[in-house]
Image: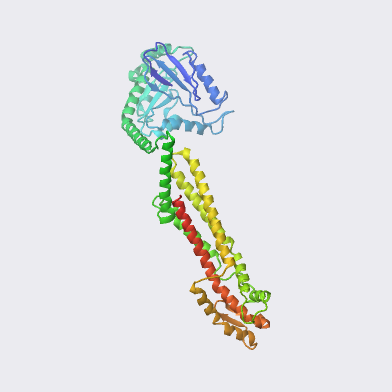
Amino acid sequence: MRLQDDPSADSPVLQPEHSNGRVVTTTEANVADAINTATAEIAGSGKGISDAPITLVVRKRGVPDLTLVDLPGITRVPVKGQPDDIYDQIAKIIKDYISPKESIILNVLSATVDFPTCESIRMSQQVDRTGERTLAVVTKVDKSPEGLLEKVTMDDVNIGLGYVCFRNRIGDETYDQARVEEEKLFKYHHLLSKIEKSMVGIPVLAQRLMQIQATIIAKCLPDIVKQINDRLSRSSTELNQMPPDLVSVADAVREFIRIVKQVCSSLEKILVRGEFDEFPDDCHFHGTARIAEMLNAYAKKLPVEVPGRGGLFLMEEVRVLEETKGVNLPNFLPRSAFQVLRKKKVETVMQIPHDLVNEVWEYVEDLVSKVVLQHADNFPQVQSSCRRAVQMLMEKARARSAQHIEELIEMELVADFTANPEYMKTWYEIMEGHEKFMDAVVDTSKPTLLNLVGFGEVDVSHLRVNSELAGQAFDLSARLTAYWKIIVLRLIDGLALHVLRGGHLQAHPS
């Protein structure tokens, strides 16, 4: 119930307000029916319960400006039609209202009960241990006046704000009639008249509430002012951080260019210079480190040794030499044999570079999108355009990478060349074992197990029936082993440089 002093209201104006915002006007005689109707709409006509409030606004000349909340009575044992946890529901509603330090707790006690046993006393003491904001209101004093004076003066339950006793309205009495009867009761009753006049009557209760409320407001006002100032400061800061309104195309273009410059600056730090001061705690934005991890994983996936050597030693080379032999001098190694083997080995690793660029550009696209949206966070109207621009940029980057990989692979498939001295060095090291190898193949009295540079421990017994091709097969395998290292290095270095160049392009788009 919200009481409002209205000097223009000669008679009270009563308006129940529903939680859905609907307001109706009623009279003093019909206010109880209006509240019951509103209660039925919210909680049902049975014994349900709801935490949705019904506000009764009372405007009248001379009434104190107060807001009173009539909380539900405590029910421990549910009756038919009530939820099993009704006590918990009611207790939660009550505590939500009595917990704030600005609230005055009106502990309504019946004069007919023993105060220390009241559940409402125990509940109020949980949130107000000292009783400094608890005021006890004693009802039904005319029903049980015996011993009431001792109850309210002894204060066994530590009610810090004291007690106020009043007489309940009976039957069809008007509120004015009830107040007259109340005044007579406390003035002439042989027991109740002994209670101090500052502790009896509805007018005293209203006055006490106004005084207590003023005291609490004065006490809480500095904190309230501080909270208001803090909120104002935060709001002012947020207001200053808000972007300007875009009222024209020129404004939008200028802001878009500013966003692009900020994005390029951030991406240059992340993808080129390896700086992550803008995102120190988010490893996802440490671009150079993540791309380096991908490149290292890619290098490990490429086989260091020539792939497909799980069978008998040099038999693959022997079969290829048999199929590529022609009418040539017997001591010449067919170049086509080397080309066949080289192409076959390269084809086994063709997919690995494609997997790398797909992984890299998927990561870069996610990174660029997040950076763009962060800088465009205050301009949702341009975010969709930024997303489309990023997607188009990534599609072009993927297409360039796919073409670059195709060219890398195609060069390895169609030609064999290197100026890297490591090729000849490795070939010479392997060929130093050629004589030892041929002796073991030709001389059947020698052991068939050999330890050869570039191949490790091998068995040559099966090559004795192909001794005429064994020497060429050894030379062919030595060339392929030496050249494979060059191929792997080119695939790693060429693709790594391409990826790094692509990252640079993302940071400096045209």
Up the image or down, 79 lies above or below 23; here it is: below
Question: Based on the displayed image, in which of its 4 quarters is residue 275 positioned?
Answer: bottom left
Most foreground residue, 449 or 385: 385
Q: Is residue 78 above or below residue 323?
A: above
Q: How many marks?
A: 0
> Percent from the top left, x then y, of residue 369?
48, 47
Q: Position of residue 478 (x, y in %)?
A: 57, 76
Give the quarter of the image for residue 245. Answer: top left
Instruction: Point out the image quarter for the N terminus.
Output: top left
Can residue 117 be seen in this snapshot?
no
Percent position of residue 484, x then y: 55, 70
Viewer-nearest residue: 121 or 105:
105
Q: Is residue 386 visible to us here?
A: yes
Task: Estimate the x, y position of residue 47 in percent, counting from the top left.
Answer: 56, 26
Looking at the image, which residue is at 52% across and 21% down?
38
Residue at the limit of the structure toward the bottom, as seen here: 445
Is 49 located above or below residue 420 in the figure?
A: above
Residue at point 52% right, 66% down?
A: 490
Residue 1 or residue 117, whichever sits in front: 1
Q: How is the image coloured?
A: rainbow
At x 59%, y 75%, the residue is 477
Left or right position of 83 against 110: right
